Amino acid sequence: MTKALEGVRILDMTHVQSGPTCTQLLAWFGADVIKVERPGTGDATRGQLRDVPDADSLYFTMLNSNKRSVTLNTKSEQGQAIFAKLIASCDVMVENFAPGAIDRMGFPWEKIQEINPRMIYASVKGFGPGPYVDCKVYENVAQCTGGSASTTGFDPGPPLVTGAQIGDSGTGLHLALGIVAALSQRETTGRGQRVECAMQDGVLNLCRVKLRDQQRLAHGPLKEYPQYPNGTFGAATPRAGNASGGGQPGWIVKCKGWEQDPDSYVYVITQAASFHELAKAIGRADWLEDPEWNTPEARLPKLDQVFEEIERWTMTKTKFEVMDILNPLNVPCGPILSMKELAEEPSLRATGTVVEVDHPERGPYLTVGNPIKLSDSLTEVERSPLLGEHTDEILKDVLGFSDEEIAAAKEAGAV
Ligand code: CAO
């Protein structure tokens, strides 16, 4: 079976998380991803948060599956000559260095286009053009500057960052889509182009509904927010705690065992269409006859009491029992699953969303496989490469170097 991106060769100049998530996805779709790393050290994440001494960290291995690694000193003269040959031989170049780093290596966009007019040059930066364009940015900075932190957490309470890596992995996803779109356009124009994603923009895109709410504020209180009707609204979209983002009220409630297990909770949505079933299930059929409770409008100012009643019931059940009872009643709900539970979940293993791969230095490890399933381009997750594992192979097969030329490049410290 072929793969969707078979025949596409990626010059992967990415490091840390945002760029590598993008090129890992492209590799899973069949692209030949050549990861260029600095000789000796490589991607800094190889050595960060190490759990096994002297072995590539999970930080690195979980973000660099299915890639080939070549070491190259892009600041040496010989290294730059090799880099230019790689640019000429690839379809896409992806990088997420600090602003201007590739230019400082001597490869501004104009030069890249000159070497290879079909090249698609994709970059992640913290910010787009504007006052912060030159800043270095990590995940949580992006969450804070993209609108996520100001709208996450409880009111009152400080802004909160989320565990989902919406700045890094989120922007990597955006970039991957841009690259695939540019590859498609190249089919008709024959030209490459620049693809740029700013982490601030990516986070804001994922916080789109919060900018929606900012504009709704001008027309009255946000009735689905916990601040309504007993709290106050300020000038900006407030933090909504665990309230449901849509028009259907939801909240996280405790389940049996919550005193010992920090994840013994379930999210329950009290959508109007199935409220009568929910009320009966929790032993409050009386609500259905009572005008104080039997319409969404009547319940809205008393949602805290509705969820207190639901919690009284859920605290007598495990989160999985709640699922088993409420799902057949069409009551949308979801257990709070821990990372341990997700790692052990058989259905995620069966679909390849959680995969175990073997690694020569560290042995077997778990990784998150491709969450995007194509019926005609199956993903086989392979381990990440060791530093420079494919240097000789790439110089020989991609660039046509002879053994003598490879030896000379090594001698000069270029690879
Ligand atoms: N050979 C020689 N030099 C190399 C090289 C190679 N193969 N690969 C990288 N380098 C050099 C770069 O040219 C750069 O040198 P200069 O500073 O002299 O131009 C240097 O290594 C380091 O690059 P950097 O500034 O990008 O690295 P950093 O650790 O200081 O910053 C980060 C890291 C992530 C903050 C920054 O790269 C950044 O802001 N990137 C864009 C936004 C982004 O992707 N952030 C998400 C990161 S994941 O949380």
Image (spheres, rainbow, N blue to C red):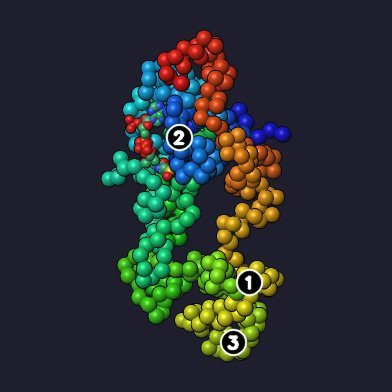
Residue 58: x and y in percent read 53, 43
Q: Quadrant of residue 396?
A: top right
Where residue 236 sits: x, y (%)? 34, 65
- The amino acid beneath tag 3 is Trp
Where is mark 3, residue-wise? 287
Indicate the secondary structure of the residue bearing disc 3.
Answer: helix
Pointer 2 residue = 43
Q: Give SS at disc 2.
A: loop
Label 1 sits on residue? 318
Return the residue found at the far front.
53
- Are the residues flagged by discs 3 and 2 in contact, CB closer than 8 Å? no
User: Which of these two is toward me, 388 or 203?
Assistant: 388
Q: Secondary structure at mark 1?
A: loop
Query: Which residue is drawn at the image coordinates 41% and 79% (left, top)?
Result: 229
| 51 vs 402, nearest the viewer | 51
Q: Quadrant of ligand 1?
A: top left
C-alpha separation, residue under disc 3 versus residue under disc 1? 24 Å
Label 1: how many Cα within 10 Å (few below 14, some 14–19, many 20+): some
Question: Which kind of residue does numbered mark 1 sit on?
Answer: Thr
Ligand 1 lies under 8 Å from the Cβ of mark 1? no
In-image side of 334 versus 376 (left or right): left
Query: At x 40% / y 61%, what residue is drawn?
Result: 160
